[in-house]
Image: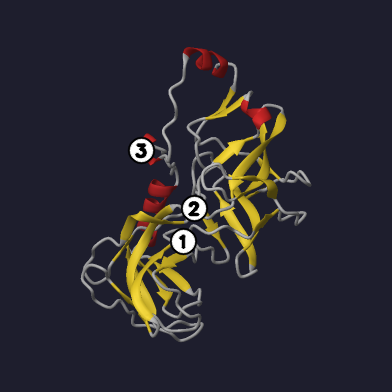
């Protein structure tokens, strides 16, 4: 079972992979394309997580305008033979590496898209093989900071701590109403973006797995205006604590450890992976390999 499906996409003209591992969107490699509108031209990086509409762009396309998409390698324009059923704009097709294609609308702001498989049974089998037991492995070079060397005295103290291992499922709860923030095996939090649009962000509930998907647009490297419990609608953002990495406001949730709930902090800035525990809980609990969310 998988929480997020990351699509690997290729150019339909030259077949070259469009995946950009250097520029992340939703904490996953993005889909890199050249774009051109009346406002200008540049590069756009689309989220590779199916169902997410987040992206970064060299300029902000005006909502409702038609956009032309080009392969950054062969420079050819990528345009489909069918139009969007919602707004009649041309659809933009990209090839799935497992066979088939993804097509999305070329009109800025339109969220119409579809997936089409060449061989459904084969595609489902490959989906299960690639994503069914998918685990993000955090390597030392992928972390922002190196963990400090542990002295023998510190190691002895750590031996009596509870260690929450990377990949552990975090049973998350609202610190206000104590209701679960887990819905169908995904952490669900209500959000408000910088345009005062309300929606939800879905986070991986596994420690040190950073995939996310949101129902409203969230710019990368920008602070989310508010994060709330979707049950009681109370804010999870703290007024007196900031991220130890970037200085942004942090949100507080409760997670289950041993027989009690503990405070778990996470940064409210999109793309920042910092997370931490309260000073009281640090003495009893250690998050394995955790220097970021």
Residue 135's place in the image compared with 258, above or below, is below
Residue 185's place in the image compared with 56, above or below, is above
Residue 233's place in the image compared with 136, above or below, is below
Q: Nearer the viewer, residue 267 or 76?
A: 267
Residue 212 x/y as whole percent? 52, 53
Q: Give the mark nearer the N terminus: 3 vs 1.
A: 1
Q: Secondary structure at mark 1?
A: loop
Q: Which of the two discs, 1 and 2, sits closer to the camera?
A: 2
Residue 119 x/y as whole percent? 34, 62
Q: Nearer the viewer, residue 254 or 250?
A: 250
Q: Give the mark nearer the N terminus: 1 vs 2.
A: 1
Residue 165 located left or right of residue 241: left
Residue in the image at 38% along x and 36% along y: 139
Q: Which residue is mark 3?
A: 141
Please give the label number shown on residue 271. 2
Residue 179 appears in the rendering: yes
Residue in the image at 56% along x and 60% along y: 214
Distance between mark 3 and mark 2 Cα atoms: 17 Å
Residue in the image at 52% along x and 48% along y: 246
Please give the label number shown on residue 50. 1
Q: Nearer the viewer, residue 176 or 259?
A: 176
Distance between mark 1 and mark 2 Cα atoms: 18 Å
Disc 3: CA contacts within 10 A as few (<14), some (14-19) or many (>=20):
few
Residue 109 x/y as whole percent? 51, 77
Q: Secondary structure at mark 3?
A: helix
């Amino acid at each position: 079972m998988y929480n997020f499906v990351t699509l690997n996409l290729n150019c339909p003209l030259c077949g070259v992979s469009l995946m950009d591992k250097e520029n992340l969107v939703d904490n996953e490699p993005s889909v890199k394309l050249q774009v051109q509108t009346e406002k200008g031209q540049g590069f756009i990086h689309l989220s590779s997580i199916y169902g997410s509409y987040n992206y970064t762009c060299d300029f902000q396309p005006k909502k409702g305008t038609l956009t032309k998409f080009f392969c950054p390698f062969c420079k050819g324009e990528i345009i489909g033979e069918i139009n969007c059923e919602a707004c009649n704009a041309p659809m933009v097709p990209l090839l799935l590496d497992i066979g088939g294609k993804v097509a999305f609308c070329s009109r800025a702001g339109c969220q119409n898209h579809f997936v089409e498989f060449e061989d459904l049974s084969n595609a489902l089998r490959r989906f299960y093989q690639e994503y069914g037991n998918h685990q993000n492995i955090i390597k030392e070079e992928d972390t922002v900071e190196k963990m400090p060397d542990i002295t023998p005295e510190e190691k002895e103290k750590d031996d009596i701590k509870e260690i929450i291992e990377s990949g552990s499922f975090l049973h998350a709860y609202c610190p206000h109403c104590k209701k679960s923030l887990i819905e169908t095996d995904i952490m669900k939090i209500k959000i408000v973006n910088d345009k005062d649009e309300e929606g939800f962000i879905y986070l991986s509930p596994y420690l040190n797995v950073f995939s996310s998907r949101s129902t409203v647009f969230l710019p990368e490297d920008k602070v989310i205006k508010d994060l709330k419990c979707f049950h009681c609608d109370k804010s999870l953002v703290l007024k007196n604590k900031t991220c130890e990495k970037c200085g942004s406001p942090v949100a507080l949730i409760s997670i289950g450890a041993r027989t009690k709930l503990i405070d778990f902090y996470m940064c409210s800035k999109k793309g920042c992976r910092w997370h931490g525990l309260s000073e009281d809980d640090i003495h009893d609990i250690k998050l394995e390999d955790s220097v970021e969310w």
